[in-house]
Image: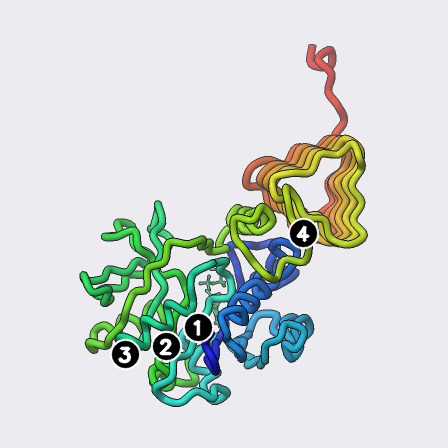
Amino acid sequence: MLPGVEAVMLVGGKGTRLRPLTISAPKPMLPAGGVPVTEHQLARARDAGVDRVVLATSYQAEVFEHYFGDGSALGIDLEYVHEDVPLGTGGGIRNVAARLRSGPDDPVLIFNGDVLAASDLRAQIGLHRDRDAQVTMHLVEVDDPRAFGVVTTDADGRVIEFLEKTPSPPTNRINAGCYVFRRSVIDAIPAGRPVSLERETFPQLLAAGANVLGYVDASYWLDLGEPSDFVRGSCDLVLGRLPSSALPGRCGDFLVLSDAEISPTAAVSGGTTVGTGAVVGDGAVVDGCVLFDGCRVEAGAQVRGSVVGRGTVVGPDCVVAEAVLGDDVRIGSRNELLTGVRIFPGTRLGDVSVRFSSDAS
Ligand code: GTP
């Protein structure tokens, strides 16, 4: 356990890559495996012994407090600090400093609010303490590191270089978005202006010869950057590939939330979550999807690898694959929405009339 360790969770980003889902809710509040991404992280922190978390909010800030309140339902003490103007990752951390209770040399955990992970938080803090580090960052190895900040280390695990999103990375080890900071390092971040941890704070610490360590952990890790990542993360939770004590029910091949209706002739699989009050009609196929609350997949529709927004209706015999349908969309019958399609909230698409081969002659 980590008695008395505080954490800061950065949840103020706009989540532009996940639009249109992030028009209706901030990315960390999107439901993965039936509960907000943040809830999985808070449960993980709590399970590791963290007893107090300060959420650094900006975009749609009120949604967090409305859902989590003071954290008592989760067994964790929650506070919220709002940025009227987004202060970036470093500025957001600095902005909560006045609310931290840790002493200058104490470790403070920092999480990005849009990551699903199973790394060993206790081991990361243990390494930080044993090696008297100023910052200890969780590193993971990925196949394609170009979209991430890459981090090179020496043989002792000390960080040598931090390069943000580069076309020819020198390593496949990347910044996984979970750090332990010595409290005094947080206080030294400039206050009252936007600061990027990745572009400003880390390069400056390294240039000053600070003791910045990499903590390499090969367990499950997923950054929810793009819609396909979000769908995968949700399905992985349901399929048990990522354990989480925040999952709202017994999972198997799929997860069904309260008051959902699935026709006995429908086929639901692949880690799909069927949201509260959602309906899956006769003969419909739903594979590897996230169906938000109150949506409907009508009879004969096939939906694969997709997100169906809150209250959205997918009409009879539609084919939807690797698509994102925002909230309150109406898709008429027999439409085909294929790879990469994103439909914005409130959109209406009419029925598609069937063309028989004789029509074409
Ligand atoms: P994209 O716009 O799609 O890149 O997503 P994002 O807005 O979440 O940005 P990014 O993935 O770079 O953010 C990493 C983490 O920092 C996420 O948990 C964000 O919520 C958080 N974050 C980003 N910018 C800010 C900010 O200005 N203030 C605070 N408090 N958090 C931020």
| Cα distance between the residues tagged 4 and 1 | 30 Å
Give the Cα separation between the discs numbered 4 and 3: 42 Å
Question: In x, y percent, where is residue 7?
Answer: 48, 76
Q: Which of marks 4 and 1 is nearer the N terminus?
A: 1
Comparing labels 2 and 3, the label whose residue is closer to the camera: 3
What amino acid is found at the position of numbered circle 1 in the picture?
Ile
Q: Residues within 10 Å of mark 3 (few under 14, many from 20)?
A: some
Whether pointer 4 and pointer 3 mark residues with C-beta atoms closer than 8 Å, the reply is no
Residue 187: quadrant of the picture: bottom left
Label whose residue precedes the other's in the sequence (4 or 3): 3
Earlier along the polypeptide chain: callout 3 or callout 1?
Answer: 1
Could you tell me residue 361's position as x and y percent?
69, 10
Of labels 3 and 1, the one closer to you? 3
In the rendered structure, find residue 250 and report the number of the disc placed on it: 4
Residue at position x 56%, y 80% from top?
A: 82
Residue 165 left/right relative to 317: left
Q: Which residue is tagged 1? A: 110
Q: Are marks 2 and 1 in contact (CB under 8 Å)?
A: yes
In the displayed structure, 10 sits above or below 234; it is: below
Q: Distance between the residues labelled 2 and 1?
A: 7 Å
Where residue 141 sits: x, y (%)?
34, 52
Q: Nearer the viewer, mark 4 or mark 3?
A: 4
| Residue 351 in sight here | no
SS for dot 4: loop
Q: Is residue 205 left or right of residue 1?
A: left
| Circle 3 SS class | loop
Between discs 2 and 4, the one toward the N terminus: 2
In front of the other: label 4 or label 1? 4
Distance from the alpha carbon under mark 2 to that under mark 4: 36 Å
Residue under numbered circle 2: 181
Q: Name the residue under label 3.
A: 132
Q: Quick check: is the Cβ at mark 1 less than 8 Å away from ligand 1? A: no
